[in-house]
Image (cartoon, helix red, strand yellow):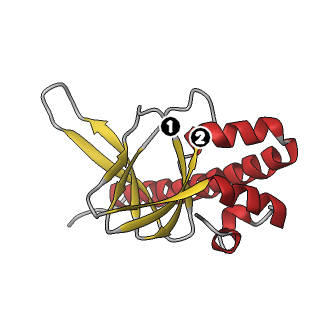
């Protein structure tokens, strides 16, 4: 069983009241996976939402370079202690949009997607907190992705303007 105190330190729960955190703790469980374990891949049914307690998880997408070339996994983000992942578990059609690969031994706090969705319907105040946590998480991830893209574009721009003697 997960204790309320176990959840209080995570950013995802910063806007939750003590009673709401207690409800979340009541539906949470723990998982432990070795490095190299694939939690899920893009296209899988999103049946869990995760908070990373320990370890590192790479979120990745598959790049298909062509019909006769191997699929190349591309790391989109690295999830570390305290961060959440698996927002697709709460947003229809509830299908993961990226893969999640444990890069080292990983401990996760998990929430069943059906249970979370039921909470958002039965307790609108809880739903607001949950979806605010999801939007904060997505906003942070989008900001990170934009920084990577701008950095990549800047590097390409510098390279295209460099003259070689």
State the separation of the CA atoms marked 2 and 1. Answer: 7 Å
Q: Residue at x 64, y 52 (%)?
A: 27
Toward which corner of the image does residue 58 lie, by quadrant? bottom left
Where is residue 136 drawn, in percent x and y?
A: 70, 55
Kindly identify which residue carries mark 2.
113
**Mark 2 crowdedness (10 Å alpha carbons): few <14, some 14-19, many ≥20:** many
Q: Is residue 86 above or below residue 154?
A: above
Residue 70 as seen in the image, left or right of residue 146:
left
Q: Can residue 164 be seen in this snapshot?
A: yes
Q: Can residue 17 be seen in this snapshot?
A: no
- Give 138 or 5, whichever is nearer the viewer: 5
* Count of labels in the image: 2
Where is residue 60 drawn, in percent x and y?
A: 37, 49
Q: Is residue 97 above or below residue 25?
A: above
* Image quadrant occupied by the C terminus: bottom left
User: Dot 2 lies on which element?
Assistant: helix
**Mark 1 crowdedness (10 Å alpha carbons): few <14, some 14-19, many ≥20:** many
- Give 145 or 91, whichever is nearer the viewer: 91
Residue 91 as seen in the image, left or right of residue 75:
right
Confirm or deny contact between disc 2 and disc 1 (CB under 8 A).
yes
Q: Residue at x 79, y 52 (%)?
A: 129
Q: Residue furthest right?
A: 125
* Image quadrant occupied by the N terminus: bottom right
- Give 126 or 148, whichever is nearer the viewer: 126
Q: Residue at x 57, y 26 (%)?
A: 93
Where is residue 78 drawn, in percent x and y?
A: 43, 62
User: Dot 1 lies on which element?
Assistant: loop
Q: Residue at x 45, y 54 (%)?
A: 153
Kindly identify which residue carries mark 1.
46
Say which label, 2 or 1, has the lower sequence index.
Answer: 1
């Amino acid at each position: 069983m997960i204790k309320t105190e176990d959840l209080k330190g995570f950013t995802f729960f910063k806007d939750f009241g003590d009673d709401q955190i207690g409800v979340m703790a009541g539906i949470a469980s723990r998982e432990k996976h070795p490095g190299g374990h694939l939690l899920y891949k893009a296209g899988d049914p999103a049946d869990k939402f995760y908070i990373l307690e320990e370890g590192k998880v790479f979120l990745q997408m598959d790049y298909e370079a062509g019909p006769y070339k191997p699929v190349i996994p591309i790391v989109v983000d690295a999830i570390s202690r305290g961060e959440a992942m698996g927002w697709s578990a709460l947003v229809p059609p509830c299908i993961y949009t990226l893969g999640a690969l444990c890069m080292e031994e990983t401990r996760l706090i998990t929430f069943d997607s059906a249970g979370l969705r039921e909470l958002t319907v039965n307790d609108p105040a809880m739903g607001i907190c949950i979806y605010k946590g999801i939007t904060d998480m997505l906003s942070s991830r989008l900001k990170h992705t934009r920084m990577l893209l701008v950095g990549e574009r800047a590097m390409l721009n510098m390279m295209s303007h460099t003259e070689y003697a």
